[in-house]
Amino acid sequence: MSKILAIETSCDETGAAVYDSQKGLISNALFSQIDLHKQFGGVVPEIASRSHLEKITQIIQKALGDAKTTLDDIDTIAVVNKPGLPGSLLVGVCFAKALAVAKQKKLMGINHLEAHIFSACIENSLPFPFLCLTASGGHTAMYLVKDFGNYECIAHTLDDAAGEAFDKVAKLIELPYPGGPEIEKLAQSVNFQDFFKYPRSKSKGLDFSFSGLKTAVLYDIAKRGAYDLKTKTFLKSNDQEFKTHVASSLLNAIADIFVEKLKTAHKKYPDVKAITFVGGVACNKFIRSKIETFCKNRTVKFFYPSPQFCTDNAAMVAFVANYRAQQHKFDDFNLDIL
Ligand code: KG4
Ligand code: ZN
């Protein structure tokens, strides 16, 4: 039996979790910085690092306390060391190294994307191989997952991430950050109708491209007299109905793009036994229902994590750390970021 303390500070969430090799996840603590970044319409890297520094001790103490354990019972300190904001990653990695040296623990660096890829496994027993669609504010990619720790990136975004497209269009029509949940709320109020039928991605093959969609939305809004391209001003700040129509149309376009790419991927890899949808954007119930219908029609199983395991969290880091510990994949104290 062994216990892992996992730390996540790659972007704007400070997370810590404790994982027991026999009992599974026993605690998962998180501080989200969303309120700190809201006024800037996106994550401000320096504010993010300073906030991690301020919160990391209490979040780790909370995770240990909730797990009714102490550092003395922990065998391994696992920490996300890539990819992410350098200043934010440094806080977690320095803290993890200091703990590991002072308390003589094993140390392990974890790839944040690998943690997302296996996040649906925290609560479900998944059949291999499976296809994983990861969509967050910083990343959008597809993976062919053959086993724990054995996966291959089969597609990535050529420009913006899907979450970024939600966030940027939301900013354009003056919705608060992060845009994804706001857009979903508005779209739901009109029963997810596709009003403006924005163009679907033209990128060939499996790779994604969302910057064209974002630009198409901008020009469509301008064409409808709601945006002044010269002064870069949104002209319908008080027109809730228009905002709702933009939001619902955008959500339809992004959902269709995902289903189309999954269709292409499934044709290429027909032997996959399941499809998973992970990352912050996987909180979106409309996109999930579209993917679910696609999977049902093809008799492929569909899995997605609970919302707290979709957005950044330390539980998914702990899960990966647990199987890596069983494979004896530890790091030495030269562990670096990125
Ligand atoms: O995984 P995450 O917490 O952080 C990154 O690693 O980026 O994902 C955050 C992203 C944001 O872009 C946010 O707008 C999006 O996930 N998001 C959503 C929803 N909830 C969060 N997008 C669409 N629908 C949602 N319900
Ligand atoms: Zn993430």
Image (spheres, rainbow, N blue to C red):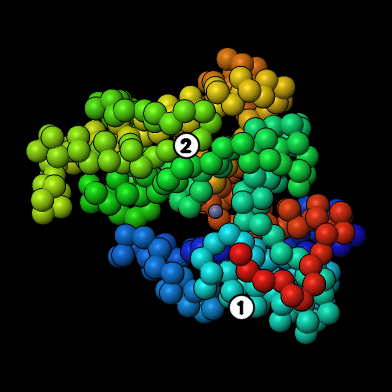
Which residue is tagged 2?
208
Q: Amino acid at mark 1?
A: Thr
Q: Which residue is mark 1?
A: 57
Label 2 residue SS:
loop
Task: Name the residue rendered at 41%, 46% in the picture.
Answer: 160
* Vertical relation: 285 (above or below) 168: above
- Quadrant where the N terminus sits is bottom right
- Locate residue 211 relative to residue 215 in the image: left or right: right
Q: Position of residue 269 (x, y in %)?
A: 67, 24
> Where, quadrant-wise, is the C terminus in this rendering?
bottom right
The furthest residue to the right = 1
Amino acid type, callout 2: Phe
Name the quadrant containing residue 77: bottom right
Left or right position of 331 against 87: right
User: Which x, y percent locates residue 113?
Assistant: 61, 51
Q: Residues within 10 Å of mark 1 (few under 14, many from 20)?
A: few
Q: CA distance from mark 2 to mark 1?
A: 38 Å
* Residue 145 visible: yes
Q: Is residue 96 above or below residue 316?
A: below
